[in-house]
Image (spheres, rainbow, N blue to C red):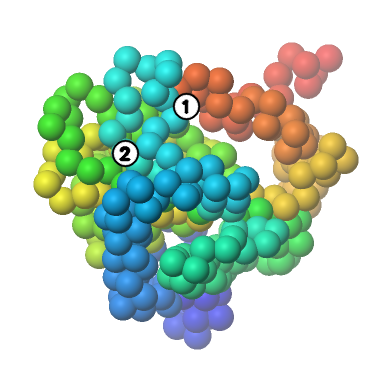
């Protein structure tokens, strides 16, 4: 549903987008992508993972744009993450993957949803709706897909350890197999799949994990992550000036993408939220 559709449906107040503030996470339906498209996309990814390893070998770090790999933590963790992954950079140029026409199709659909959500977020914040787009936040698109096969000893490892996703917005599609948990306070809460719903994860607020899959059916997820395309030393990001004032000063320092990248993944998926590293120190602020 677009902003226009909200107005057409009679909405007179800007809706709070679920619980962005508390959770950094929400689930959307009626997003305008047909169930057929969603089923076709998930089936295409399932078929990709199903082909023999010999055929998938060509994607083993094929270039900097496409990489198929088994796990990130094989060298420094006691138990490997029980999953395979495909990472594809969709920008600035689309990858050459003839076999995955559905991937290119999904990029268009997911980008449209992300753009509309960013517009709603901007309107919710009281800034012009194109603000995030103009800041290039739809330009750097990385699609991350995971395949969690049956794990014979799911109590001994995880599918994916706790982490936050580093981006502006993440549009997650998953099949019907359970596994995703999100952290709220100190509790891990299971996110039960809802057919054809999309899970939206805002910024790097949400800590989440995926348990190893005890089911004979594989769990499949795919998530384009949207990040700013302007990534130079002089491209500075921070709290929108429009929403700060002497009475409501910014709580965060400005930053550049290279500064964020320096924080990188230092261990098996550091679960520190980057946002916490850029909080203004109260004493520093008052000095
Ligand atoms: Fe994630």
Query: Residue 203: which disc?
Result: none
Which residue is disc 1 drawn over? 269
Q: Kindly identify the residue that appears in the image at 31 percent across and 78 percent down.
A: 36
Which residue is disc 2 drawn over? 83
Q: Is residue 193 above or below residue 214?
A: below
Secondary structure of the residue carrying numbered label 1: loop
Q: Hey, which quadrant is residue 82 in on the image?
A: top left
Tell me where residue 15 appears, x and y as whole percent.
49, 64
Relative depth, front residue between 42 and 17:
42
The answer to whether residue 78 is left or right of residue 218 is: right
The residue furthest front is 54
Asked whether the beta carbons under mark 2 and mark 1 sit within 8 Å of each other, the answer is no
Q: Hey, which quadrant is residue 154 in on the image?
A: top left
Q: Earlier in the sequence, mark 2 or mark 1?
A: 2
Tell me where residue 142 appears, x and y as whole percent.
56, 51
Q: Kindly identify the residue that appears in the image at 49 percent across and 68 percent down.
A: 98
Q: Nearer the viewer, mark 2 or mark 1?
A: 2
Relative depth, front residue between 71 and 12:
71
Relative depth, front residue between 181 and 13:
181
Q: Is residue 245 above or below residue 226?
A: above
Q: Residues within 10 Å of mark 2 (few under 14, many from 20)?
A: many
């Amino acid at each position: 549903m677009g902003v226009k559709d909200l107005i057409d449906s009679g909405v007179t107040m800007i809706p709070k987008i679920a619980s962005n503030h508390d959770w950094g996470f929400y689930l959307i339906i009626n997003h305008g992508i047909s169930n057929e498209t969603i089923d076709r996309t998930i089936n295409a990814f399932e078929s990709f993972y199903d082909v023999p390893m010999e055929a998938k070998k060509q994607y083993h770090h094929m270039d900097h744009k496409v990489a198929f790999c088994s796990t990130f933590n094989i060298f420094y963790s006691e138990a490997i993450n029980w999953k395979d992954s495909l990472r594809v950079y969709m920008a600035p140029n689309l990858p050459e993957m003839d076999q995955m026409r559905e991937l290119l199709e999904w990029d268009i659909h997911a980008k449209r949803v992300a753009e509309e959500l960013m517009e709603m977020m901007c309107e919710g914040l009281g800034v012009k709706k194109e603000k995030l787009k103009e800041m290039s936040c739809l330009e750097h698109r990385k699609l991350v897909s995971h395949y969690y096969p049956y794990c014979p000893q799911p109590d001994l490892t995880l599918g994916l350890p706790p982490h936050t996703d580093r981006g502006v917005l993440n549009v997650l599609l998953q099949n019907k197999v359970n596994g995703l948990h999100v952290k709220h306070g100190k509790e891990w809460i299971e996110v039960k799949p809802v057919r054809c719903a999309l899970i939206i994860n805002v910024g790097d607020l949400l800590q989440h994990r995926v348990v190893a899959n005890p089911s004979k059916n594989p769990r499949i997820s795919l998530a384009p992550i949207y990040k700013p395309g302007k990534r130079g030393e002089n491209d500075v990001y921070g709290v929108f000036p429009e929403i700060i004032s002497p009475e409501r000063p910014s709580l965060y320092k400005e930053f550049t993408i290279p500064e964020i990248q320096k924080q990188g993944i230092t261990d098996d998926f550091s679960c520190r939220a980057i946002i916490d590293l850029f909080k203004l120190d109260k004493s520093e602020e008052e000095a």
